[in-house]
Amino acid sequence: MKRTALWLGAALTTIVVAMALVAQAWTPHAPNRMNMRARFVAPGDPVHWLGTDHFGRDITSMILAGAWQSLHVAVLAVALGLGVGVALGLAAAARRGAIDAVLMRANDVVFAFPAVLSALVLAAVLGAGAHTAVIAIGVFNIPVFARVARAGALQIWARDYVVAARAAGRGWLGITVIHVLPNIAGLLVVQATIQLALAILAEAGLSFLGVGIQPPAPSWGRMLSDAQTYLDRAPHLALVPGAAIALAVFGLNLLGDGLRDWLDPKLRRTR
Amino acid sequence: MALFLARRLATMLATLMAASVVLFLVLDILPGDPALVMLGTEAQADTLAALRRQMGLDQPALTRYLAWIGGVAVGDFGLSYTWRLPVAGLILDRMAVTVPLAALAIVISTAIAIPAGVLAAASHGRAADWVIIAASQIGVAVPNFWIGILLVLGFSIGLGWLPSGGFPGWEAGVGPAIAALILPSLALALPQAAILARVTRSSVLEVVGEDYIRTARAKGLSRSQALWRHGLRNALIPIVTIIGLQFPVLIAGAILIENVFALPGLGRLIFQALGQRDLIVLKDVALLLAGLVILVNSLVDITYTLIDPRLRGRVA
């Protein structure tokens, strides 16, 4: 069986994670060091491999450091959505009734606020920054995970072994932890991978607007918004960060698709 | 059916109310003194007092909320603090950009995605299918604002065919106005088209094995003729659903794209409102955009229960 998507996705994701980790210890130059005598250096330079920007900052170093920032926000946001969403979804599936109804309605309300919109609203109150990005993206992730967890859990609750466990007198919390959660873990991992990809896209958008990661921390989104000013004289400033975002998102999407096929061949989409 | 519609409408109104309460809590209650947030700590005492009066901050929170929602219900969105204009007028002006932008994007993405999806399904497993799958995988990974920048690089700076940003206004004529919207709506449409093409492909593939397709083939239609004439219509429900589900993405995208192209639309307005700390405009536009998402999702719900009456009982 071919697992091209899984392997390619895993490889690309590993590269991006490695970039982020390497940047913690080493970058070719200090990502924020300005050098007014080396502005707009074109890519392919022996000193500045991917060139420099309008302040003479090294693009390679900024991309590496930006990978860390981007993943950092995305992972925190997805963790927030996963933690809260899964807890709510599991409770709704286990208890049904009023909790379930309220949760489903609340989901509709949250879905009406895409991360970019809620980030603009939150930035007015909390100020712009990584924390605002994490909250805005994370909150939008809650209903996604709540739905996936609820739908998965409902199926498990109908299984014979759960019926048996209930008959044996095990409470809903015990069944959820022992039987339901382990059986939907794969589903959640797949969803988390896809949501990470979306979170990286959303974070790039927020930083592009200036409400996400703040300077001096380098970010792919802000590099793109800076690049717009110099588009006619230094197009590489726009090409490199955009490609980095696309690569990270592409890798995670492939990884998510590949994992889904691998963990549950029944769910595989017709291809 | 009437009962279903009434229920769906009630749910929609309840969701809208809940969204407005959330916005009110975040922008009116959470900051403590919104007037202080808007003017900053350096503000003159009398300016601050005047703004507090205008915003009704001396009133209890419930009164303020009801006054806001009561106004919105009759089209009175209050007065913008920075623009010194009724917010309703500002919103109407900006809608003249955002609505055509979004509509154009939906048209373009559907026009690309449905033929691509049907083509991929018709040539299932062959080269055309793989090319379309690969293109759509890349399409969903690429941020729309980056596509916008690349389009400017190619078509404005490189070829000089289309404007790189700004909007001449509809009074400058339909031609120049549409020209200003082509690149932004393309940037908005391409990632959407990628998702839509995938859904079209897989939902057409679902119906490929149905009897009526075999009958159509037996009548002498080619594989793709049969899919176009009989398969697509039956595959339409998931496609319509995805167009609806993607609407929040479109709204979020419009906020970004309007800022890439400096288009004076709602997305630009809400971004400027944040910059100027005009909480009144921010709250109104946020409610409008969230309301649009809720409205579209309800319409999609209603539409597909119209297409397929079997779904009616399922929706609580």
Image: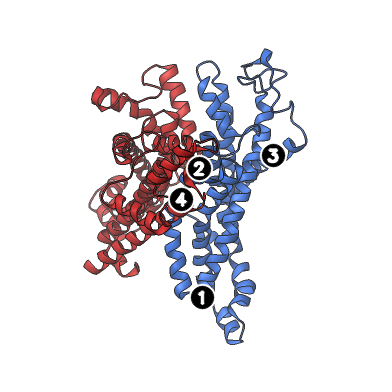
Chain colours: A blue, B red
* Residue B249 pos. (x, y %): 43, 45
Tell me residue B145's x, y (percent): 47, 33
Lateral position of residue A232 relative to residue B161, left or right: right
Residue labelled with disc 2: B36
- The Cα–Cα distance between marks 4 and 1, rounded to whole angstroms, is 35 Å
In the current view of this chain or complex, which residue is farthest to the top?
A: A37
Asked if marks 4 and 3 fall on the same chain, the answer is: no
Tag in front: 4 or 2: 2
Contact? badges 4 and 3 (CB < 8 Å): no
Question: Alpha carbon of mark 3 to alpha carbon of mark 1: how far?
Answer: 41 Å
Residue placed farthest to the bottom in the image? A168
Q: N-terminal of the two: label 4 or label 2?
A: 4
Numbered disc in front, either 4 or 1 = 4
Q: Which residue is mark 1?
A: A95
Which residue in the protein does label 3 denote? Answer: A20
The alpha-carbon separation of the residues under discs 2 and 3 comes to 40 Å
Res A56 quadrant in image:
top right
Chain for numbered disc 2? B
Image quadrant of residue A163? bottom right
Q: Nearer the viewer, residue B132 or B104?
A: B104
Q: Nearer the viewer, mark 2 or mark 1?
A: 2
Q: Dot 3 lies on which element?
A: helix
